[in-house]
Amino acid sequence: MIVLPAKIILFAIFGAFLTGIACSLVGSFVVRMNLSSLGFCMSHAAFAGAALGLLLSFNPLVIAIIFSVLVAFILGPIAEKAKLDTNVVIGILFSLTISLGLIFLSFSPGTAMSSTALSILWGSILGITINDILRLTVITFSIILIIVLFFKEFQAIMFSRKMAEASGINTKPFYYLILFLTGITVALSLKLVGGLLVFALMINPASSAYQFFYDMKKITIFSPIIGVFCCFLGILLSFFLDLPTGSSIAITSSLFFGISVLISPKRKRG
């Protein structure tokens, strides 16, 4: 078991709490809209941005946010103008961003295997600072506020975007808002879970909640609860077994999803 200063442990707990809420809340909408690959794409966009930051000797987090937001802003318009399914465009952008990320790291041989680069890939919760906590706090409360204010619009879009438009709702701003929130949430979660695993924290807790509830309000409430639980349990496992934190959280959330499928009331009804 790793013995750590109380300050580091406290920061890790706060970071896990906020990341679990933010990722799972956004994930509940992403999963409902069948855009599960969106989290995968955004995580690798953030990874590519952070890798470029290393190459340019600039703050990796800033470039990661820029890349994620950029992908979020171009994803919707490209899918609509090309008249392709959003998941098709996501697949194209995913292959592009992961390739760019690996290229950027290859041009930075001195830092490619440094602690900074590895923290981008796998997460480094022990490196969370007060500034990271403040950023996560802002995005988490922003997501909660946006969901509370526009829940009816989001719910209508998730049920049927065409029907929402027919009822007079301008769906584009809300659809793009989901993409934007996904991008920035992924970028700010890099330190906890890492660029290659953050999508697991976004998809698995939300998918687990869907195994037990039909009501979107209940899913939106329980997704972050499950996300926070998986974060805490994953951190405990990583501390006790000396495992990478991001991997531990991803495995924990995956196991929780597997168990939820086995005991799901929906499975029994089926």
Image: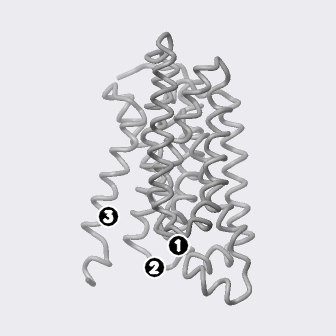
Which of discs 2 and 1 lies nearer the camera? The answer is 2
39 over 163 or under it: above or below: above
- Which residue is at a point 62% across and 62% down the rendered structure image? 76
Quarter holding residue 234? top left
First in sequence: mark 2 or mark 3? 2
How far apart are labels 2 and 1 at the CA level? 8 Å
Quarter holding residue 210? bottom left
- Which residue is at a point 49% across and 70% down the rendered structure image? 32
For the C terminus, the quadrant is bottom left
Amino acid at dot 2: Tyr
Q: Secondary structure at mark 3?
A: helix
Amino acid at dot 3: Ser
172 over 249 or under it: above or below: below
236 over 171 or under it: above or below: above
How crowded is the residue under tag 2: few (<14 C-alpha within 10 Å), some, or many (20+)?
few
Of residue 206 and residue 265, the one placed in the foreground of this image is 206
Of residue 39 and residue 13, the one placed in the foreground of this image is 39
Q: Secondary structure at mark 2?
A: loop
- For disc 1, the marked residue is 218
In the rendered structure, are the residues bearing label 2 and label 1 in contact, judged by CB atoms less than 8 Å apart? yes
Amino acid at dot 1: Lys
Label disc, if present, on residue 19 of the rendered structure: none
Outermost residue toward the bottom in this view: 167
- For disc 2, the marked residue is 214
How crowded is the residue under tag 3: few (<14 C-alpha within 10 Å), some, or many (20+)?
some
- For disc 3, the marked residue is 260
How crowded is the residue under tag 1: few (<14 C-alpha within 10 Å), some, or many (20+)?
few
Left or right relative to 255: residue 46: right
